[in-house]
């Protein structure tokens, strides 16, 4: 069982990153790949959970121990698998997640992929007390993001980070940012697709 991996990020894709550890590339499924950047000099530490099934072995990566701890709590809920837990962590509205669990807001939780009413109710039942007993650090993890990181700006920033990860220079990214800010709000993927069209 892996606890964490330390190495170089060599690839950033929409759903995963690849980290090179002593010449071996590990594919890690992560909540937000674009928080990482391809850098062949900077060593990073990524916390890891290994999920083993009869037909598949997957590694899930986390920015810190607190994010991993929350993931472990989620997968202990009946009906929540590792990929569903990761999809929940990818949502930037962490304060909304905590409030939904604390207030038995099943409707809010069913907006996540693969989460039906029954599973949402189970999340509230299993995690309500645990959420209220989070450590200070874990609570910080779940606090709402700043205004510049939420909503439209969060999607745009993620797209711009993706461009940097793909190797585009800072001046190119800044130029594209001005163009994208003129558009109607769209998802990270749509921002990224439009940016690549403009750059190419």
Image (tube, grey):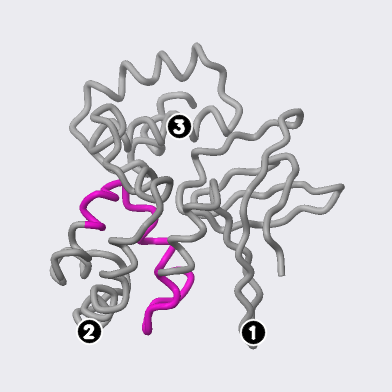
CA–CA distance in space, label 3 to label 2: 41 Å
- Residue at (82% x, 53% y) in the render: 24
Q: How crowded is mark 3: few (under 14 residues within 10 Å), some or many (20 or more)?
A: few
Q: How many marks?
A: 3
Q: In this view, does 56 lie to the left or right of 91?
A: right
Q: Earlier in the sequence, mark 1 or mark 3?
A: 1
Image coordinates for residue 28, horizontal then vertical, percent: 62, 57
CA–CA distance in space, label 2 to label 1: 27 Å
Numbered mark located on residue 192 in the image: none
Task: Determine whether the residue tagged by mark 2 lies in a helix, strand or loop.
Answer: helix
Position of residue 135 relative to residue 200, above or below, is below
Q: Comparing marks 3 and 2, which lies closer to the viewer?
A: 2
Numbered mark located on residue 118 in the image: 2
Q: How crowded is mark 1: few (under 14 residues within 10 Å), some or many (20 or more)?
A: few
Image coordinates for residue 155, horizontal then vertical, percent: 32, 37
Whether the residues at callouts 3 and 2 have beta carbons within 8 Å, the answer is: no
Q: Which of marks 2 and 1 is nearer the N terminus?
A: 1
Q: Residues within 10 Å of mark 2 (few under 14, many from 20)?
A: few
Which residue corresponds to mark 1? 55
Give the residues drawn in magenta, as a range: 74-98
Position of residue 127 relative to residue 168, above or below, is below
- Residue at (45% x, 32% y) in the render: 196
Numbered mark located on residue 196 in the image: 3
């Amino acid at each position: 069982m892996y606890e964490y991996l330390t190495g170089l990020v060599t690839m950033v894709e929409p759903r995963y990153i690849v980290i090179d550890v002593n010449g071996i590339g590990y594919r890690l499924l992560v909540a937000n790949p674009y928080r990482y950047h391809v850098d062949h000099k900077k060593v990073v530490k990524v916390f890891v959970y290994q999920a083993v099934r009869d037909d598949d072995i997957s590694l899930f990566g986390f920015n810190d121990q607190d994010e991993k701890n929350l993931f472990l709590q989620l997968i202990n809920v009946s009906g929540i698998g590792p990929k569903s837990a990761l999809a929940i962590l990818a949502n930037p509205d962490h304060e909304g997640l905590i409030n939904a669990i604390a207030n038995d807001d099943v409707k809010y939780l069913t907006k996540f992929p693969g989460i039906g009413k029954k599973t949402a109710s189970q999340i509230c039942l299993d995690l309500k007390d645990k959420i209220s007993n989070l450590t200070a650090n874990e609570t910080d993890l779940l606090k709402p993001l700043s205004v510049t990181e939420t909503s439209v700006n969060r999607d745009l920033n993620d797209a711009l980070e993706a461009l940097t990860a793909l190797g585009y220079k800072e001046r190119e990214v800044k130029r594209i940012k001005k163009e994208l800010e003129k558009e109607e709000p769209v998802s990270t993927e749509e921002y990224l697709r439009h940016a690549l069209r403009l750059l190419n």
